[in-house]
Image (tube, rainbow, N blue to C red):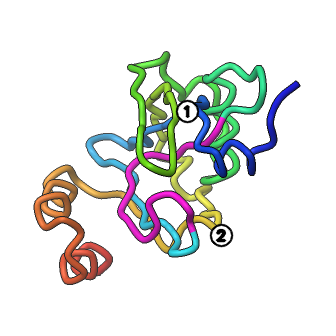
C-alpha cells in the first residue's frame, strides 16, 4: 500500500521524482514558479519535474511531467538519466533522477504553460541564468529577464 501525496508532504517522507532540463540548441527553457507552489514558490527554475507515482519508473515520470507542464511529449527527445540528486529541506525530501529534453525547433510553438504552476517562461542563454543566480533572484534582475 502507498501513502497519499498529502501524507508524504505532511510528514516529509523521502520519495522519488524526476527533473528535466528542457534545452533548445544553446538555450535553456526557464520559468518562474507560481507563488502558490508549496516548494520553491516564486523562484526561477530551469527544471520541469515532479513526484513519481507509486512504482513508476523515473523516465516515465519525466515524460509525464514534460507533457503535463509544457505540453511536450516526444519520447525520442528525452535523454537517458544524466544523474541522481537528493533534495533535502525541512519540507521536502526527494531523490530526483535528472534528464535532458532536447526541444526540436518545430516543437517550440507547442509549449503551453501549466498556469497553476508557472507565472511565465521562456528560453534563456546561460549568461542570463548565471546573472539571475548571481543576483540571488533580485526582483529587478527577474524583470530584466522577463523583458
Residues at discs 2 and 1 in contact (Cβ within 8 Å): no
What residue is rendered at 36% in x and 58% in y? 123
Q: Residue at x 13, y 61 (%)?
A: 131
Q: Is residue 131 magenta?
A: no
Residue 126 image position (x, y, % from top left)? 19, 50
SS class of the residue under badge 1? strand
Q: Secondary structure at mark 2?
A: loop
Q: Is residue 123 left or right of residue 64?
A: left
CA distance separating discs 2 and 1: 19 Å
The part of the image, by quadrant, that contains residue 66 is top right
Closer to us: 109 or 66? 66
Please tell me the numbered disc located at residue 116.
2
Q: Quadrant of the C terminus?
A: bottom left
Region rendered in magenta: 37-51
Identify the residue at the far top of this view.
80
Residue placed under numbered mark 1 in the picture? 18
Amino acid at each position: 500500500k502507498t501513502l497519499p501525496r498529502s501524507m508524504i508532504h505532511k510528514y516529509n517522507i523521502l520519495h522519488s521524482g524526476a527533473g528535466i532540463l528542457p534545452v533548445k540548441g544553446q538555450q535553456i527553457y526557464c520559468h518562474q514558479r507560481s507563488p502558490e507552489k508549496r516548494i520553491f514558490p516564486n523562484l526561477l527554475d530551469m527544471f520541469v519535474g515532479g513526484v513519481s507515482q507509486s512504482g513508476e519508473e523515473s523516465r516515465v515520470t519525466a515524460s509525464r511531467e514534460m507533457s503535463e507542464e509544457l505540453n511536450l511529449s516526444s519520447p525520442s527527445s528525452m535523454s537517458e538519466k544524466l544523474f541522481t540528486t537528493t533534495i533535502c529541506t525541512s519540507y521536502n525530501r526527494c531523490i530526483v533522477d535528472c534528464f535532458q529534453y532536447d526541444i526540436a525547433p518545430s516543437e517550440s510553438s507547442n509549449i503551453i504553460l501549466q498556469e497553476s504552476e508557472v507565472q511565465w517562461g521562456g528560453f534563456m542563454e546561460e549568461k542570463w541564468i548565471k546573472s539571475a543566480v548571481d543576483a540571488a533572484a533580485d526582483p529587478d534582475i527577474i524583470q530584466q529577464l522577463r523583458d
